[in-house]
Image: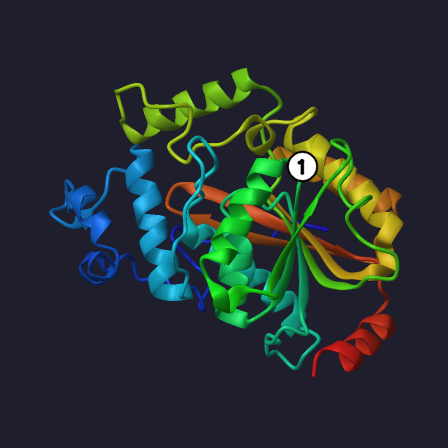
Amino acid sequence: MTLDKPAPKDNMHPRNSHRNGYDFKQLTKGTPELKKFVGLNEFDAESIDFSDPLAVKALNKALLKQYYNVNGWDIPEGYLCPPVPGRADYIHYAADLLAELNGGKAPRGNNVRVLDIGMGANCVYPLIGNGYYNWQFVGSDIDPVALRSAKNIIEANKSLEGQISFRLQPGKDNIFTGVVKPDERFDLAICNPPFHASFKDAKDATATKWKKLGVMKKPTLLNFGGQKNELWTNGGEAGFIRRMIEESALVAKQCLWFTSLVSKKETLPTAYSTLKWVKALDVKTINMAHGQKNTRIIAWTFLSPEEQAAWKDERFK
């Protein structure tokens, strides 16, 4: 379970629609409200102020409309507004896990079912995954307001009805329990876990980030927003992923690949030791890089090669 060499900066997945940057002329044509946030940066290139949450939100709205046919996207004030290109990378690398079983071709169509743990009010992973691959999604969250927001997005996009559904996680300390139904099967489980252990940790990390980027003003906690349950949790990222791995063993044969984003490399030893303890049969670590940020996906399965082959024959038509 050794970590691969770090990926080069800005080395987005080959299928990522955003790897060549932003065409602001095209984006503002489709989403005129973005135009007021666009200006020239220090390199005389068109950009936005990424420390402005309203600008980030407008950019997301434009990207989701142009590339994934999503109209009427919005989120409540103060909720997480994640960068679309990085979320797209996760979806494409997760698709590669399925492609390994499918002759190197990522399966498409709504026969592929994906569980998004902690989907959030933005519903971004399901929107990208359905828009690009036509996968069917179930999104779970402990926050009823977040689920209502996600439902509003689907209601504004009639083509998504029946493609993305939602479930409230009734237990604040549960992950799969209470969400995955008996005998239900998913080809993928994805998750972007809270990665801070407290409000103070989140605030300090944000201050460090702005200092590195040379932003001297004091912006909001995060330019991408976020509620408490979206940003920090007991035990931080390592604690959440450990609990996720432990609970995944309870539904071991109901999902082909369990995956989670891992923002901190220090989380990996705990994850690896927990995966060994629950007897995961295969573990993969996939590196990603965007700008100055390095991150990775950890993936695991409890299915033997023979069971994986049978799964593919039954589900990847």
Report the front residue among 219 and 267: 219
Q: Position of residue 94 (x, y in %)?
A: 61, 61
The extreme top residue here reads 200
Q: Residue at x 71, y 75 (%)?
A: 101
Q: Is 52 left, or right, of 5 in this rendering?
A: left
Report the front residue among 297 and 134: 134
Query: Pointer 1: what residue?
Result: 142
Q: Position of residue 32 (x, y in %)?
A: 20, 54
Q: Position of residue 93 (x, y in %)?
A: 56, 61
Q: Is 249 left, or right, of 260 in this rendering?
A: right
Q: Residue at x 86, y 60 (%)?
A: 253
Can residue 19 be seen here? The reply is no
221 over 288 or under it: above or below: above
Q: Residue at x 50, y 57 (%)?
A: 155
Can residue 106 be seen here? The reply is yes
- Which amino acid type is marked by label 1? Ile
